[in-house]
Amino acid sequence: MDYTIIIVFLSFVMGVVSETEILCTTSYCTSYITEYGCNSLYGACRAMNSTYHGTYLPYPAACNCCDYCLQSLNEGEICVEGLPGMLPPAEMCGLGLYCTANENNPATCQQLVSHCTNAQDEYDERAANGTLGSMEVRPLCDGEGDFMPAHCIPGSICYCVSPYGDRIFGEIPYKNPWDVEQMTCECSLNAWKAQNTLDPNYTVHVARCLSNGLFDPLQCMNGPNGTCLCVDSFTGSPRIGISTVTVLELAEDSPTCFDPTIHTNGTYDTDCEEQYNTILAAIDSYVAEGNTNHGLALPSCQPDGRYARVQISGSKKICVDPSGNQIESYEAFTNSTAADIMDCNCARTRWLLKQAGVVELPSCCNFGNFEAWQWRRNETFCVDVNGDQIGREVPSQNVATLACYQTNIGDPCLV
Ligand SMILES: *[C@@H]1O[C@H](CO)[C@@H](O)[C@H](O)[C@H]1NC(C)=O
Ligand SMILES: *[C@@H]1O[C@H](CO)[C@@H](O)[C@H](O)[C@H]1NC(C)=O
Ligand SMILES: *[C@@H]1O[C@H](CO)[C@@H](O)[C@H](O)[C@H]1NC(C)=O
Ligand SMILES: *[C@@H]1O[C@H](CO)[C@@H](O)[C@H](O)[C@H]1NC(C)=O
Ligand SMILES: *[C@@H]1O[C@H](CO)[C@@H](O)[C@H](O)[C@H]1NC(C)=O
Ligand SMILES: *[C@@H]1O[C@H](CO)[C@@H](O)[C@H](O)[C@H]1NC(C)=O
Ligand SMILES: *[C@@H]1O[C@H](CO)[C@@H](O)[C@H](O)[C@H]1NC(C)=O
């Protein structure tokens, strides 16, 4: 592989293999505890009831051999902000609370304010003042105030979001609540972090994802003679004890995580990646001949290696399914204004829901975006670019009272 390596990928390969397997054996911990002992747990950590509880953390010494737990402080209690070199604290602010400095007063545990908690507050206010739509979903925040990785639209899809709540790669049809628990989006987040923290001038090779944002259980590195190994789909950690093969040796059951419905004998490249490499080689040879006006467009591939939703085809942009086939007839001339805002989110949602046998499908503009308002039964409501409802629904005949109807001067596909 070129300059960049699978940074995130390698870091967990090294982490798991070198630390867990070689150093941190049960016998290592047994002798560690014999030699150094473990501190007894605070009362709060043993009680663990609503008023008196603690937070378990990784033990701050090699191998996490001892249980380690700090007493949780409640909102408004005085806390100490950690400083480098200080002794480890005995207590810390509980879930959702952060130790926040107050002018001239000691720091106290306060509700965390973040993009996500702000979004929750706005949701709660609108629920109270009656401006909330029936299909709007309260944002879910984690203990650090970040958005939880999966966002689901009732009757539609779940998609992965970044810690800031922006949509990232990874989606599934939303059929039952159990789907969400499975949708941890770790691979999508891994790809998102790599794209946002590494030098954008280099192509970043990150672990291959599945369409739902989990890790592809088969990961290969370094071209045809490179190594393939099996990983855990949720964490991306290598599964120990499964023999590796080279890419050229890939075949059914070799290695055991090879899945013939998504993997191909003898190669790890997908159709999109192969097409990308072929066209790139053609462009290079045109350019070498001094011909820069070759008219060739590279396909755009997703973190699962399949086709991204918007592709260029001749003088048009088209919406495609993951295999690269145009969805219905969603398209726009590349020279049009629609092409500039074309996201194909609606076209892809329709495709995904149809695959899942859903009959109530969203209405899309002919260039593949969501129409600004959608219809359900007798009602109509505004949506955003991902099809999430914004604001309260109204009876269909009152469509002209919708805020989005007014800003779009009656055109659901205004460009
Ligand atoms: C929580 O546990 C502590 C210590 O065991 C006890 O004193 C307290 O009454 C308990 N509180 C509740 C609400 O159960
Ligand atoms: C309802 O609350 C939202 C969020 O704070 C606010 O933007 C909106 O103006 C309020 N609407 C009414 C009618 O009070
Ligand atoms: C990426 O390349 C551009 C043009 O060569 C350069 O201006 C920019 O500084 C580079 N970015 C980084 C992060 O190195
Ligand atoms: C892969 O290995 C084979 C045999 O060892 C060698 O002939 C071939 O050149 C290698 N290919 C690449 C791309 O390194
Ligand atoms: C892939 O390899 C397996 C095992 O060698 C073989 O049975 C299967 O037919 C091959 N599939 C294709 C599509 O070539
Ligand atoms: C855009 O491109 C199409 C096809 O190439 C052409 O027919 C059309 O006239 C162009 N429109 C504008 C506004 O340039
Ligand atoms: C549609 O609206 C009418 C009158 O407002 C109502 O009687 C009917 O139950 C509604 N149908 C549905 C499916 O909501």
Image (cartoon, rainbow, N blue to C red):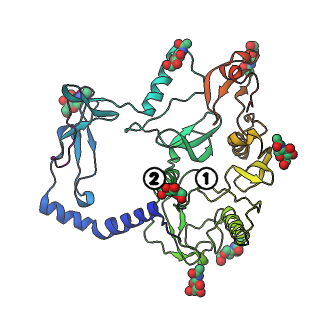
**Nearer-the-camera pick, 415 or 155:** 415
Label at residue 197 = 2
Q: Is residue 199 in view from this perspective?
A: no
Sequence-earlier tag: 1 or 2: 2
The residue that appears at 22% across and 63% down in the rendered structure is 29
The residue that appears at 18% across and 46% down in the rendered structure is 88
Q: Give the residue number, with chain letter if any, for mark 1.
A: 211
266 w.r.t. 321: above or below: below
* Residue 17 pos. (x, y %): 37, 68
Cβ of mark 2 under 8 Å from ligand 3: the answer is no
* Residue 329 pos. (x, y %): 82, 45
Assess whether residue 77 is covered by the magenta stretch: yes
Q: Residues within 10 Å of mark 1 (few under 14, many from 20)?
A: many
The residue that appears at 23% across and 67% down in the rendered structure is 28
Under mark 1, the amino acid is Ser
* Residue 137 pos. (x, y %): 55, 30
**Nearer-the-camera pick, 200 or 360:** 200
Q: Based on the displayed image, in which of its 4 quarters is residue 20 positioned?
A: bottom left
Q: Based on the displayed image, in which of its 4 quarters is residue 27 positioned?
A: bottom left
72 w.r.t. 11: above or below: above
Q: Is residue 77 in view from this perspective?
A: yes
Q: Residues within 10 Å of mark 2 (few under 14, many from 20)?
A: few
343 w.r.t. 23: above or below: above
Q: What element carries label 2?
A: helix
Q: What stretch is highlighted in magenta?
A: 74-87
The residue that appears at 73% across and 26% down in the rendered structure is 375
Magenta highlight: main SS: loop
356 w.r.t. 202: above or below: above
